Amino acid sequence: MIAELLFAVFFGLLLLGIHRKVIARIQRRPGPPVWQEILHMLKFSFKTTWVPATASTALFCGVVLVAIGIWTAALVVVLSGGSLLVIFAIYMLHKIVEHGFGLSSGSPYGKFGGVRSVISAASEIPLFVSVAAIAIFTQSLMITDIIAYQEINGPLLITVPLAALAMYVVLLSKMPFGPFSIVESKELVSGYKTEHFGVWRAGLEVCNGLKTYVLLLTFILVFIGNLPFWLVILAMVIILITLSFVCALSPMLSPYDSVTVQTLIAGLMVAYVALLGVMS
Amino acid sequence: MNEIGGAPLFFLEFGDIVIYFTPFTLTLFILALVFTVFVLVSRPERQIDIAFGGDAYYAKEISLSELRFRRFMSIACGLACMGAMVTGDVFDFTLFVSLVGICNVGIVAAVKSRHVQNAAYQYGLVALAGTVPMFSAAAMIAATTGTLSMLELAKGMILIPVAAKALLVLGVMGEGMAPFYAAKAEMFRAPGAPYVIMCSLSSLLIFLRVAEVILLL
């Protein structure tokens, strides 16, 4: 499991590096090297670490461990074929982590980042819609059962394309430099992570790597099914590049517009699942 | 669909009231526990704010009495949350959720600011109103099925009215509205990170749990 965890962290960070590179090339910039996020993580690991004098110390430090802990748990759940509901819960709890990062420092930039994270709660609803749609078809939320269902009936990507689209929107809302990345927009310096430096930021980078890997892997397992390892990696890169295109070609929305668009998408998805429920 | 949160890990019986842990409820329980410990050991942050009309800034402080009361309310909220996460009884769930709502009102209302207390008053009204559909749902389930045990109800022997499920969700939404008030401008100007986070966490946890309960019933 340690080997899988390390691979997930480094490959997740590599995916984030590819994301930055693709965005840069679309925007006709050279962009950083693809391993830049890995270098960031290593660099921050050895930089001077401090806790701001105004911070709530225990929360400031503890929330980093919680962030790594919840995504490690998510990885274990995905690899062991556990319940999709646990992944849903962890995804939602990541919002509390962002909130905790932002509020614990005392910095107004962090605080605004944390508050923006709370007000964009509508971004979680499409994930719940995906979960509900899957439950209607597979009658189970265990990832092993969902994979088994797809081996008999074909990928859920074809059966419930709108549920896959909902999950794709969820992935998009968590990608950096995307239209919904209001929690870390430039007018807030780095948003909720502004004051976390040194080893705390390295921990946050580890969390980001794990989160990217887990969400993409979940998408593949739940909507495409069990693939050979090299195909999973290839599928991850392809999905990521499509996300990078969306991020590169769409401006970051204002907080108000971001919440409005997410709420509209959530409303449409809820109506879709209600329709599926009535039809079944 | 009986194992939507994963296979049950163990049961703890108190007479006919059963507490059960699945990977899902255990994850939520541990998170509530961890953040309750943070509330116990943390001092609030000193929020930086600017002095209008100049380039000066200052750090806000929380008085000891306010800190004690908000900490007490946050710990009570954490304990209620832990109960709501693992209970296997619909009525106990509604009780714990209403306690979460009361504690959230307390966390917000303790701030000595007219604007924040106004937000707390509004939230209090919503939370109070939320208890009516929530307890109505529990009453309807008891009246139609003769039991409030989630494990019994999950067997699917008796159909539970959709209206009861809808009322339960509506009630939890009322109780879990705290973050929307906590995110208001008046509130996030008030320092006290671990306590405000407890509002958000508890609301999120009860939303997650009610999703499991509805899928289970």
Image: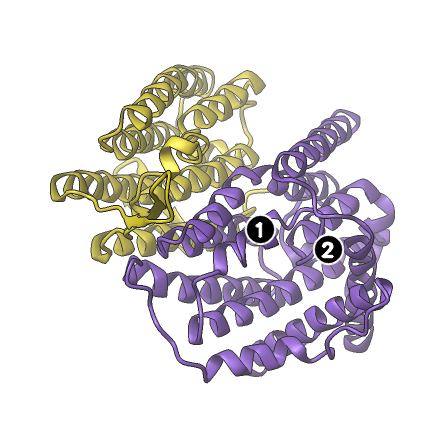
Chain colours: A purple, B yellow
Residue B165 visible at all: yes
Is A250 rendered above or below residue A202?
Answer: above
Q: Is residue B88 visible?
A: no
Percent of width and height locating residue B171? 44, 22
Q: Residue A1 vs residue A245: left or right?
A: left
Q: Residue at x 63, y 49 (%)?
A: A141
| Chain for numbered disc 1 | A
For mark 2, what is the residue? Answer: A222
Name the quadrant containing residue A254: top right
Q: Residue at x 37, y 44 (%)?
A: B54
Disc 2 secondary structure class? helix
Work out how far the residue at label 1 is from the one at label 2, CA to CA, in angstroms. 37 Å
Mark 1 vs 2: CB contact within 8 A: no
Image coords of residue A118 (percent x, y):
50, 41
* Vertical position of residue A14 compared to residue A256: above or below: below
Q: Give amino acid for label 1.
A: Glu
Q: Amino acid at mark 2?
A: Val
Residue position for label 1: A187
